[in-house]
Each structure stands twice: as structure tokens, then as C-alpha cells.
Amino acid sequence: MKQPTKFKRITAATIKARWKKKARALTQPQRQQALDMLRAGKSVKAIKETLNVDLDTVLGVVELCTVKTVITSLKEVAP
């Protein structure tokens, strides 16, 4: 008899991990260009169209930037 398949819960962390995986697939200059555009106040849609990537990839760049910034800040405050 076949065992029932286990339902895998999709969480926010799972979705963000997918975004980050797509963002890491970009080259460093592409990621830097996306970050520069974000800091300049460009919309996510504009970045998506400029770099010819999907929305998940742009959101992954944002997520990577946010996580690294937080970790760096914490290391500076409490080494």
C-alpha cells in the first residue's frame, strides 16, 4: 500500500529563500546595479525591466541586501 505524501508547508522563509537563490544567480555587477537603482529610488518594476529579470529575482536582491545589512550592523554594535 502506498504511503500518503506529506504536505510541505510553504512559509515566508521558504519563499524568501527562493528569491535569494535567484538573486545569487545574478552576476555581481548585475546585483550591484540593482542595489544602486534601489538606493536611487527606482521602482522594483523599473529594475525588473532594466535588468530583464523576474520580480522574484529583484525581491531576492532586496532581501539579500537587507539581511547582510542587518548582520553587519549587529557585528559593529556587538562584536
Image (cartoon, rainbow, N blue to C red):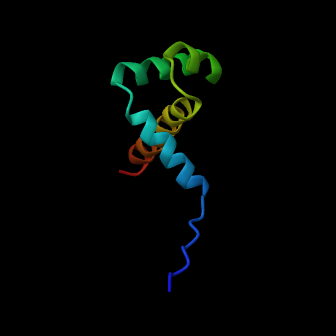
The residue at 41%/41% (across/down) is: 72
- For residue 74, say whether it is visible: yes
Residue 75 placement (x, y as % from top left)? 39, 47
Which of 47 and 37 lies nearest the eye of the viewer?
A: 47
Q: Residue furthest front?
A: 1
Which of 39 and 63 lies nearest the eye of the viewer?
A: 63
Q: Residue furthest bottom?
A: 1
Which of 75 and 39 lies nearest the eye of the viewer?
A: 39
The residue at 49%/17% (across/down) is: 51
Q: Quadrant of residue 76?
A: top left
Residue 55 placement (x, y as % from top left)? 59, 30
Left or right for 8, reference 74: right
Q: Quadrant of residue 10?
A: bottom right
Residue 41 in the image: above or below residue 76: above
Residue 77 placement (x, y as % from top left)? 43, 46
Residue 66 placement (x, y as % from top left)? 51, 38
Which of 51 and 4 lies nearest the eye of the viewer?
A: 4
Total number of numbered labels? Answer: 0
Residue 22 in the image: above or below residue 48: below
The residue at 64%/21% (across/down) is: 45
Residue 27 in the image: above or below residue 62: above
- For residue 68, say whether it is visible: no
Residue 60 in the image: above or below residue 52: below
